C-alpha cells in the first residue's frame, strides 16, 4: 500500500511539473510577445528595493533590463517574495526569477538554473590588523562578535562558535559602526550586503580568508524551458565577459564582489 501511495504521489508530481512546464514561455514566445516578465524581490536591497516613486530598482532590475534589451523586448518587473518566487516560475507567471536565487539540488527538482549571475559570501568581516585567517579562529572567549538581533547567523554562532562572546544590536548600520569604533572584533554574516555601510567609515576593513560558505546565485527558469535557459546562459556569459555584472554590482553594493564569477566559454 505504501509503495502504491508513493507511486501515485510521484505521478501527480510529474503531472504537475509537466503542466507547469507547458505554461512556461519558450524563447520564441517571449520574443513574439515583446515582453520579458521577471520576478524581483523588492525586500532584498540593493538587489531590489522601492525608490521614492514606488518603483522597484536595484542590481537585479539593471541586469534584467539589459537582458531585455539584448532580447529586443520590454521588461515587465513582477514583484515576488521568497515563498512565491518558485511557484511563479513553475506555473509560467514569470519567465525567470532573480532575488538571490541560490542553486541547490533540492530546488533543481522543481526549476532549472542558469549559470551564476553573482555570488554571496557568508563570512567574517573584521578590521585590518586582526589576526584571524579562518572563521573557526573566532571560537575564542576573548573574541566579541557583533551581530544583528534575530538574524540567521546567531544560530550558526551558537552551534559552531560557542566560546565567542556575542553583542546583539538592532540593525546593520549599528553593527558596522560598532566594529569601526572597536567595540567588537568581527561580524559573521552575508558580507556583500553591508558594503554601503562599510563605506561610511574611515577604517580599513578585512574579510577573513576562509569563508563560512559561498553561495552561487542564478536565474531560476521553469523546468525544461531549455530554449530560454540556453539564451540566458549565452547572454550572461557576454555580460560577465564585458564587465557589466561587476560594474553593476559595484554601482549598487558599493564594493567589489568578493568571489567574482569568471566568464569561461564553457559555462
Image: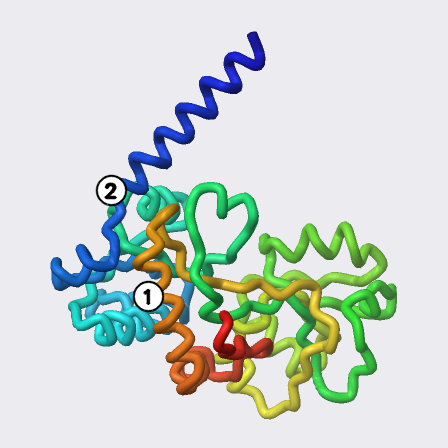
Q: In this view, does 123 lie to the left or right of 42?
A: right
Residue at screen point 29% across, 66% down = 50
Instruction: State whether residue 91 appears in this view.
Output: yes
Colour scheme in use: rainbow
- The x, y position of residue 222, in whole percent, is 35, 48
Question: Which residue of the protein is positioned furthest toward the left in this rendering?
Answer: 33
Q: For residue 265, which numbered disc appears in the image?
A: none
Which corner quadrant of the image does residue 175 belong to?
Answer: bottom right
Q: Is residue 126 left or right of residue 224?
A: right
Instruction: State whether residue 197 appears in this view.
Output: no
Between the C-alphas of marks 2 and 1, the distance is: 19 Å
- The x, y position of residue 169, in whole percent, is 61, 63
Residue at screen point 16% across, 68% down = 74
Q: In this view, does 207 lie to the left or right of 219?
A: right
Asked if residue 227 is positioned above or below residue 16 in the image, the reply reads: below
Identify the secondary structure beneath mark 2: helix
Q: In this view, does 141 lie to the left or right of 106?
A: right
Please state which of residues 124 and 99 is positioned toward the viewer in this rendering: 99
Q: In which quarter of the image is the N terminus?
A: top right
Residue under pointer 1: 231
Which corner quadrant of the image does residue 18 belong to?
Answer: top left
Residue under pointer 2: 23
Residue at screen point 66% across, 63% down = 213
Residue at screen point 52% across, 19% down = 6
Identify the secondary structure beneath mark 1: helix
- The x, y position of residue 100, in whole percent, is 46, 61
Do callouts 2 and 1 mark residues in contact (Cβ within 8 Å)? no
- The x, y position of residue 217, in whole percent, is 49, 63
Mark 1 residue crowding within 10 angstroms, few (<14) / some (14–19) / many (20+):
some
The disc, 2 or 1, on the residue closer to the chain's N-terminal end is: 2
Mark 2 residue crowding within 10 angstroms, few (<14) / some (14–19) / many (20+):
some
Amino acid at each position: 500500500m505504501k509503495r502504491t501511495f508513493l507511486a501515485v504521489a510521484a505521478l501527480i508530481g510529474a503531472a504537475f511539473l509537466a503542466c507547469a512546464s507547458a505554461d512556461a514561455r519558450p524563447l520564441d514566445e517571449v520574443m513574439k510577445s515583446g515582453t520579458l516578465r521577471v520576478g524581483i524581490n523588492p525586500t532584498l536591497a540593493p538587489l531590489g528595493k522601492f525608490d521614492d516613486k514606488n518603483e522597484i530598482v536595484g542590481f537585479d532590475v539593471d541586469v534584467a533590463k539589459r537582458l531585455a534589451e539584448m532580447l529586443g523586448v520590454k521588461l515587465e518587473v513582477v514583484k515576488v517574495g521568497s515563498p512565491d518566487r518558485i511557484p511563479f516560475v513553475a506555473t509560467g507567471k514569470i519567465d525567470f526569477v532573480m532575488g538571490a536565487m541560490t542553486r541547490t539540488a533540492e530546488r533543481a527538482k522543481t526549476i532549472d538554473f542558469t549559470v551564476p549571475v553573482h555570488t554571496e559570501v557568508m563570512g567574517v568581516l573584521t578590521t585590518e590588523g586582526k589576526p584571524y585567517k579562518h572563521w573557526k579562529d573566532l571560537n575564542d572567549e576573548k573574541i566579541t562578535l557583533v551581530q544583528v538581533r534575530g538574524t540567521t547567523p546567531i544560530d550558526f554562532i551558537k552551534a559552531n562558535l560557542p566560546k565567542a562572546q556575542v553583542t546583539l544590536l538592532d540593525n546593520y548600520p549599528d553593527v558596522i559602526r560598532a566594529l569601526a569604533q572597536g567595540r567588537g572584533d568581527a561580524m559573521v554574516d552575508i558580507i556583500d550586503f553591508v558594503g554601503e555601510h562599510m563605506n561610511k567609515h574611515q577604517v580599513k576593513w578585512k574579510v577573513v580568508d576562509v569563508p563560512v560558505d559561498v553561495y552561487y546565485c542564478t536565474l531560476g527558469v521553469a523546468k525544461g524551458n531549455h530554449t530560454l535557459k540556453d539564451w540566458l546562459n549565452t547572454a550572461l556569459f557576454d555580460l560577465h565577459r564585458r564587465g557589466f555584472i561587476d560594474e553593476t554590482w559595484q554601482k549598487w553594493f558599493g564594493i567589489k564582489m568578493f568571489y567574482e564569477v569568471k566568464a569561461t566559454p564553457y559555462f
